[in-house]
Image (tube, rainbow, N blue to C red):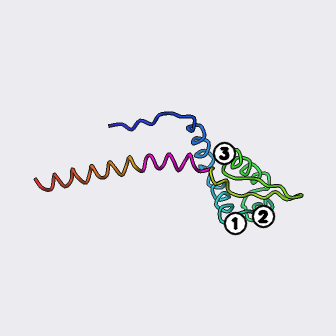
Amino acid sequence: MYLYIEMTAAAPKLDLVMKTLADPTRRAMYQRIVNAGEVTATSLVKGARVSQPAVSQHLRALRGAGLVNERREGRNVHYSVAPKGLAPLVDWLGHYGQFWRDRFTDLEKLLGELSDE
């Protein structure tokens, strides 16, 4: 049996979120923003193992994927997590989670029947 998922308008958004979070440096930066609640770009540069231009590129990608919000205050730019940014990924994982739970239940039944024989 194959699992078929209908392509929806959310599919490109899911692709973008997954592509954005596939980069380990970007994921680490996203995690720092999550942990801080809100953090300035300057703080992200200070704690990063990459250059300021690289941090800016990662932040641009996170904003473009809808994963972070940007708030300007004078010369400072503050970043916080966009709560709905991970929704396409959470929805996708939820769908597959149910699919695999069902398959494991079927497998347990089959193994139970085989052991009874």
Q: Find disc 3 in the rendering and name its residue.
A: 65
Which of these two is toward me, 28 or 116?
116
Report the magenta residues as a range.
85-97
13 part of magenta stretch: no
Instruction: Report the side of 88 relative to 79 (left or right).
Output: left
Hey, what amino acid is under mark 2? Answer: Ser
Residue at 27% x, 49% y is 106
User: Which secondary structure, mark 3?
Assistant: loop
Q: Callout 1: few (<14), some (14-19), or many (20+) C-alpha neighbours within 10 Å?
A: few
Q: Callout 2: few (<14), some (14-19), or many (20+) C-alpha neighbours within 10 Å?
A: few
Which of these two is toward me, 42 or 6?
6
Q: CA distance from mark 1 to mark 2?
A: 10 Å
Q: Are marks 2 and 3 in contact (CB under 8 Å)?
A: no
Q: Position of residue 76 (x, y in %)?
A: 85, 59
Q: Position of residue 4 (x, y in %)?
A: 41, 35
93 part of magenta stretch: yes
Q: CA distance from mark 2 to mark 3?
A: 21 Å
Q: Earlier in the sequence, mark 1 or mark 2?
A: 1
Q: Position of residue 109 (x, y in %)?
A: 22, 52
Q: Find disc 2 in the rendering and name its residue.
A: 43
User: Which secondary structure, mark 1?
Assistant: helix
Q: What secondary structure is the stretch in magenta mostly built from?
A: helix
